[in-house]
Structure formats: structure tokens, C-alpha cells
Image: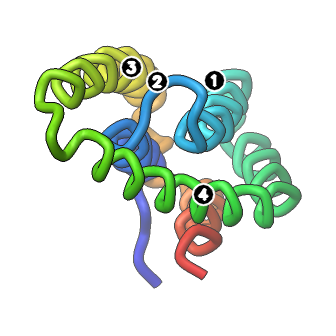
């Protein structure tokens, strides 16, 4: 089984989401899930076993919603790609907005990773976080 770095996994998903969408989109819903996960990690950074348990419970209870949101996000992203096909200025503005959101999220995750370096190797947390990727790929 591949070990997933929870910090890197969040950032990758967030950047992918923002590449496809901006405010009010299915990507924002997905970002809401990610924000909740980050909040769980931040609230439990002193007890990684508890963090793993809470992340696992959250992902288990939201699996179907996350899967549905990922599907919506992919479809919406394709529509946005078509929408901006002949509008480079509109696409540029969306890209700039996405970059701002991504930078703030990446900074938050980097801070957490620096505060709790053991998070990357915590077996329980890695197993729990693997559920996020698995649920989106089903």
C-alpha cells in the first residue's frame, strides 16, 4: 500500500480544484471538505492518533458527498474550459483568482507541516487520508 503524505495530498487536490473552478462552484464544495479536514488536523495536531480517528470518521461519513462533488467538479470544469476557450482575458482572471486561493491554502498547510513534521509519517493518519483519494477515484 502506498503511503500518502496528507499535506501533499491536500495541496494537490486543492490546486486541481482551483485549476478548474472559482467561487460558487463544485470545486468550492470540495474545498469545503478540505477545509474541514485541515481544521481537524489543526485542532488535533498535538494528538495525531486522535487526528487520524477524526479524519477517518469525517471521510467515512462524507464519502458519498465527496464522490458526488468530485463528479460535479469534473463536469463543471469541462464546461468552464469550453466557456473560456475563446476568452483568454476571462481565463486569465480565473487563473489569478485560483492562484490567490491556492497560495493561502498552501501557506496554511505548510505552516501545519512545519509545526507537526511527524504528521507526514503517521501511519494512522496516512491510512485515513488514503480514503480521500480512494473515494474520489471510485
Residue of label 2: 112
Residue at the (65%, 38%) spot, across then down: 29
Residue placed at 60% from the left, 27% from the top? 24
Are circles 1 and 2 on residues that touch, CB within 8 Å? yes
Colouring mode (rainbow / by chain / secondary structure / one colour) = rainbow
Disc assigned to residue 101: 3
Are the residues tagged 4 and 2 within 8 Å (C-beta)? no
Mark 4 neighbour class, 10 Å CA radius: few under 14, some 14 to 19, many 20 or more: some
Determine whether label 1 and label 3 are within 8 Å by CB.
no
1 and 23: which one is in front? 23
Marks 1 and 4, how far apart at CA: 28 Å
Q: Which mark is residue 111?
A: none
Disc number for residue 72:
4
Label 1–label 4 contact, CB within 8 A: no
Q: Of the residues under marks 1 and 3, which one precedes in the sequence?
A: 1
Q: CA distance from mark 1 to mark 3?
A: 19 Å
Query: Which sits earlier in the primary sequence, circle 2 or circle 3?
Result: 3
Viewer-nearest of labels 1 and 3? 3
Q: Residue at x 46, y 44 (%)?
A: 10
Pair 2/3: label in front? 3
Residue that label 1 marks: 42
Q: Nearer the viewer, mark 4 or mark 2?
A: 4
Q: Disc 4 versus disc 3: distance between alpha carbons? A: 20 Å
Amino acid at each position: 500500500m502506498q503511503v500518502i503524505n496528507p499535506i501533499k495530498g491536500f495541496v494537490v487536490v486543492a490546486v486541481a480544484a482551483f485549476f478548474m473552478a472559482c467561487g460558487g462552484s463544485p470545486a468550492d464544495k470540495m474545498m469545503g471538505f478540505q477545509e474541514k479536514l485541515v481544521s481537524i488536523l489543526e485542532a488535533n495536531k498535538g494528538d495525531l492518533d486522535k487526528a487520524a480517528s477524526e479524519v477517518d470518521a469525517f471521510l467515512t461519513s462524507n464519502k458519498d458527498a465527496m464522490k458526488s462533488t468530485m463528479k460535479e467538479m469534473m463536469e463543471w470544469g469541462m464546461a468552464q474550459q469550453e466557456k473560456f476557450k475563446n476568452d483568454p482575458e476571462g481565463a486569465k482572471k480565473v487563473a489569478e483568482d485560483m492562484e490567490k486561493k491556492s497560495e493561502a491554502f498552501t501557506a496554511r498547510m505548510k505552516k501545519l507541516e512545519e509545526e507537526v513534521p511527524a504528521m507526514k509519517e503517521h501511519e494512522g493518519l496516512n491510512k485515513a487520508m488514503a480514503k480521500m483519494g480512494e473515494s474520489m477515484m471510485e
